[in-house]
Amino acid sequence: MGKELSERILRLYQQQALSRAASSLSVAGYYHESGDNGRAVDLLEQALRFVDGESLPEVEKEESLLQLLHTLAEYKGEQVCHGKYCVQPPKQP
């Protein structure tokens, strides 16, 4: 049921880039937690493209991109880069 609902949210949420990116981030969390990390990574990479392609104030765009990149780095367990931004994964205790 969670997977079906998550996929439906993605199809129905055809609003602006930040809303789509926020939805993708939330749904990616579901996939990551349920063990489908590949799908989670794909969703985060899509969200990066949503935000990057949108005409937004620079501060808003930067905040969104960095939030997505931090999550992507965590899920991949390696440094990720997008445009001028590069983010390391969180250090493991």
Image: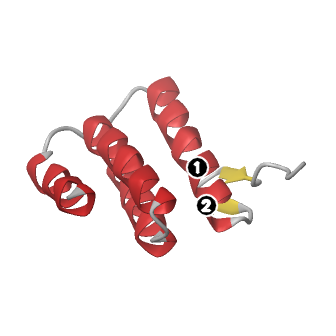
Q: How is the image coloured?
A: secondary structure
91 is higher (above) or lower (below) than 34? above
Residue 54 visible in the current orientation: no
Q: Contact (CB < 8 A) between labels 2 and 1?
A: yes
What residue is shown at x 36% (from left), y 32% (from top)? Answer: 56
Q: Does residue 70 appear to the left or right of 8 in the view shown? A: right
User: Residue under circle 1?
Assistant: 71
What residue is shown at x 35% (from left), y 39% (from top)? Answer: 22
Residue 78 visible in the current orientation: yes
70 is higher (above) or lower (below) than 77? above
The amino acid type, in three-letter code, at marker 2 is Tyr
Image spot of residue 28 (x, y percent): 41, 55
Query: Circle 1: is it few (<14), some (14-19), or many (20+) Cα within 10 Å?
Result: many
Q: Does residue 48 appear to the left or right of 71 in the view shown? A: left
The amino acid type, in three-letter code, at marker 1 is Thr
What residue is shown at x 78% (from left), y 49% (from top)? Answer: 90
Image spot of residue 66 (x, y percent): 59, 41
Q: How many marks overall?
A: 2
What residue is shown at x 20% (from left), y 59% (from top)? Answer: 1
User: Residue under circle 2?
Assistant: 75
Q: Quadrant of residue 77?
A: bottom right
Distance from Cα at disc 2 to Cα at disc 1: 6 Å
44 is higher (above) or lower (below) than 22? below
User: Is 4 or 70 nearer to us in this picture?
Assistant: 4
User: Is 79 or 83 nearer to us in this picture?
Assistant: 79
User: Is 75 or 93 nearer to us in this picture?
Assistant: 93
Image spot of residue 42 (x, y percent): 41, 68
Image spot of residue 2 (x, y percent): 26, 56
